[in-house]
Image (cartoon, rainbow, N blue to C red):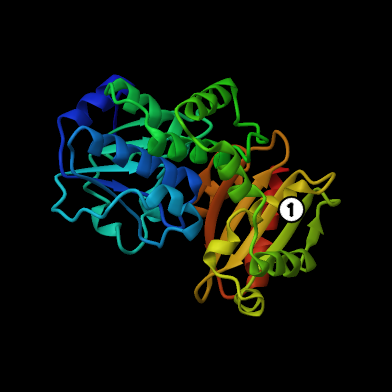
Amino acid sequence: MKTLTINECAEQLKNADNILILMHRSPDGDAVGSGYALAYALRSIGKTAQPVCSDNIPPKYSYITNGLDVQEFEPEYIVTVDLADTQLFGDKLIQYKDKVDLCIDHHPSNTGYAKYGIVDGSAGACAQIVKKVISAMDIPIDKNIANAVFTAISTDTGCFKYSNADAESYQMAAEMVTCGADSFFINRLMFDTKSRSRLELERLALNSLKYYNDEQIAVIFITKEMLERSGADDNDTEGISGIPRQIEGVKIGITIREKEENNFRISVRSAGDIDVSAICTQFGGGGHKAAAGCTIITDTLSDAERQITNAAGAVL
């Protein structure tokens, strides 16, 4: 992948049309915010642009998505946002894995799968890079873009609690509020509003809590049975991976999610200076120093637990 500057990314987009914007599977606030902010911006200058995802976008982001009607077209230019690896494309988008023209990302583990790209691992959220590209195209920030970018920054920094929330994160978030972002509504919806099924799922997950390495590693589980008992769905699982690292004395928090047969999705979070991406890269995953993920293919939940806790213990 040839690395571009912000201005070079802006020029690429200004010269393109029929732009397909890919977001990673199981989209979070940064993926949705980045994808839709860019789409709103491009459409404002007359471009045909559509953000797409293999999975359904959670309904709680409807205040971002509802303002953008669906455009159908044959893509001429393909962009990815907040997407570090083609493994995260999902089934519906995997057809584009060798066709990406431009990648905008903030994951240091980015595999360089695109023709061109900009990867800034110091950015608290991918949307911070996207916003700079939008500004480099001289596109004014309206309320739709502001809401999308603010959502991305707030969610990826844990409402500005995580170590990736730097001065630029605060400054850009403040700029988005000035441009019309409804910060109170967004933060309440993202962090202070939970469905009953989500609360029940959290209760079941907490009941599964286990400790390793003198209680410096905490592990919780989300099984298919838990989802059925709680009435929760995939949308209710977002954010649960942050629970184990909230425990006093825990340095590494791990969430093991049972997916399809023999497939376990692992989320690892650091409560300090430990680089958890070094754990997940051992299993073909990656992410950031403080937050990373991977998938373990094995016969049983207990074996997935053994593999990830052994790897975490070695890094610890």
Residue kind at label 1, given as amino acid type: Pro
On the image, the x and y values in percent for residue 306 come to: 68, 63
The residue located at (76%, 47%) in the rendering is 246
Query: In the rendered image, is residue 276 in sight?
Result: yes
State left or right for residue 186 relative to residue 139: right
Above or below, 42 against 211 in this view is: above
- Residue occupying the point 50% across, 74% down: 260
Q: Which residue is mark 1?
A: 244
The residue at 59%/49% (across/down) is 190
Judge left or right: residue 248 versus residue 181.
right
Residue 221, given in percent of the width and then of the height, sits at 68, 66
How many numbered marks does the figure carry?
Answer: 1
* Residue 115 seen: no
Quadrant location, the C terminus: top right
SS at circle 1 = helix
Is 224 drawn above or below residue 257 in the view shown? below
Q: Residue at x 27, y 51 (%)?
A: 97
